Image (cartoon, grey):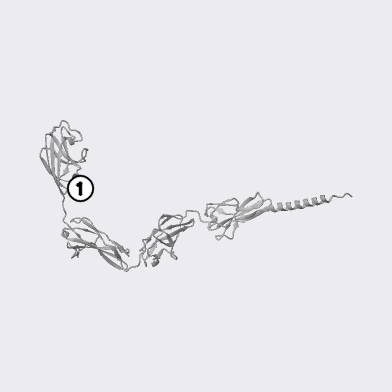
């Protein structure tokens, strides 16, 4: 019998041991898929919207393939059942899913086997339609004062009906930082002392079957302390022209502790020193028309501010009523051919004119003289415009004029102001120079 050398036997045994160990290691590496991160669902939880699943993350021999099965659950995410035919990575939520939740089961498969993993359920599927959209910002009403109640309206909204509302009142600093007020979740809020100096607003949350939208209301004024009656911080003022025939207007002044009760007014007539005042019967409005009886006296107004706790008066300073003055001005214009914009035809250098006038209020009394014109004067008039420019005629002095000529006319306020400010000129037109033969700018001399 032939003997096998010991060395060869030993080598063969070693190789068998090594080979068995490698095979065991290879089998371990080729294990079935193991999930390390659950699948997820993206998209809007609303009927008609598309939901998309991710496979999650898996370990195991590659390649790994994935299969999907969508499931319908109750609103709390339990009691789930398979949705027939829903085996794609995407799923379109239907009317049958409304008020329920959806989850997906992912099956991962390789050559060594398969395993499943479930996603978390979606939010409750809403009905198709539009979530609420604000079309008008909510607004709080009431007095922002300790002990007073303020109420917020809902504003205006569009979106699928019905829409329900919830509220959260907030306290805001001057810098605009707002924090929730604990327990203040009603439509109205009773202001307490902790809010003094802050402004208030409410967040209004609108909810329908398609979704939820929140918006903040406008801010109130700063919350004031509770007081027994309004407090005046600056006196009322009287404005307007202090002469007979004019209207005076009273301001309210500035106050704290006001309510919606508002203000009352009483005008009084005093002596020129502002004393010995007596109420004027019937003069209880914010404005007052000055009459002849007020001439030489002084007027003042009492403003009464009222709230739920009482009333407070504040009195303006007295204003003396003076006689109405009428402005009188003397005017003059020297007319020459060289002041015409268009040079006149064959006009003598001796051609000249003079216009003098007295303006009292809006009444103009005038005299016009002229001499040595080339043609027959057919028109003399007043024109608004600056020197060396063609203006707009607004008053006729005379037609087929002779010298001297005088008259009286009434000017409008704008014509009067233009004349006093040197923006009016006199122009004499002749049959030989119809655009003007001599012209002069009117100036105020006193």
Counting the numbered discs, the total is 1
Q: Percent from the top left, x then y, of residue 341? A: 20, 35
Residue projecting furthest to the front: 7
Q: Quick one: 373 or 160, which is closer to the camera?
A: 373
Q: Quick one: 368 or 165, which is closer to the camera?
A: 368
Q: Residue at x 16, y 35 (%)?
A: 337
Figure check: 227 above or below 336: below
User: Can you identify the residue that label 1 sits on?
Assistant: 413
Q: Residue at x 22, y 57 (%)?
A: 248
* Secondary-structure class at tag 1: helix
Residue projecting furthest to the left: 404
The answer to which image quadrant residue 151 occupies is bottom left
Q: Percent from the top left, x then y, of residue 154? A: 41, 59
Figure check: 133 above or below 333: below
The answer to whether residue 387 of the structure is visible from this angle is yes
The answer to which image quadrant residue 339 occupies is top left
Q: Percent from the top left, x then y, of residue 245? A: 18, 55
The answer to whether residue 400 of the structure is visible from this angle is no
């Amino acid at each position: 019998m032939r003997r096998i050398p010991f060395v060869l036997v030993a080598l063969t045994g070693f190789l068998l041991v090594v080979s068995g160990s490698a095979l065991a290691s290879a089998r371990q590496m080729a294990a079935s898929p193991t999930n390390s991160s659950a699948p997820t669902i993206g998209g809007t939880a609303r009927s008609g919207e598309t939901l998309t699943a991710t496979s999650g993350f898996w370990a195991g021999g590659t390649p790994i393939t994935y299969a999907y099965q969508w499931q319908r659950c109750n609103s709390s995410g339990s009691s789930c059942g398979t949705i027939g035919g829903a085996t794609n990575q995407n799923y379109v939520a239907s009317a049958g899913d409304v008020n329920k939740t959806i989850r997906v089961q992912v099956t991962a498969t390789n050559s060594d086997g398969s395993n499943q993993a479930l996603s978390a359920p979606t939010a409750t599927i809403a009905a198709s339609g539009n979530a609420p959209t604000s079309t008008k910002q909510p607004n709080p009403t009431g007095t922002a004062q300790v002990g007073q109640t303020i109420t917020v309206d809902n504003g205006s909204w569009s979106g699928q009906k019905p829409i329900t509302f919830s509220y959260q009142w907030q306290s805001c600093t001057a810098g605009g930082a707002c924090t929730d007020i604990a327990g203040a979740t009603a439509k109205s809020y009773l202001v307490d002392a902790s809010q003094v100096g802050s402004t208030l607003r409410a967040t209004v949350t609108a909810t329908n079957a398609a979704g939820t939208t929140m918006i903040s209301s406008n801010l109130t004024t700063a919350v004031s302390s509770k007081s027994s009656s309004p407090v005046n911080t600056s006196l009322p003022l009287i404005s307007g022209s202090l002469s007979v025939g004019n209207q005076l207007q009273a301001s309210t002044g500035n106050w704290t502790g006001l309510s919606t009760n508002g203000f009352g007014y009483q005008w009084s007539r005093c002596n020129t020193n502002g004393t010995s005042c007596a109420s004027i019967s019937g003069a209880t409005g914010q404005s007052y028309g000055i009459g002849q009886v007020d001439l030489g006296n002084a007027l003042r107004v009492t403003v009464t501010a009222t709230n739920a706790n009482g009333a407070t008066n504040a009195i303006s300073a007295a204003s003396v009523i003076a006689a109405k003055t009428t402005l009188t001005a003397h005017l003059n214009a020297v007319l020459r051919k060289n002041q015409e914009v268009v040079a006149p035809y064959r006009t003598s250098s001796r051609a000249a004119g003079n216009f003098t006038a007295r303006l009292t209020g809006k009444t103009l009394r005038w005299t016009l003289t002229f001499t040595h014109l080339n043609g027959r004067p057919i028109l003399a008039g007043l024109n608004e415009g600056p020197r060396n420019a063609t203006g707009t005629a607004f008053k006729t002095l005379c037609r087929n004029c002779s010298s001297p000529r005088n008259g009286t006319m009434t000017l409008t306020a704008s014509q009067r102001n233009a004349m006093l400010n040197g923006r009016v000129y006199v122009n004499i037109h002749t049959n030989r120079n119809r655009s003007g033969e001599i012209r002069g700018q009117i100036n105020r001399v006193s």
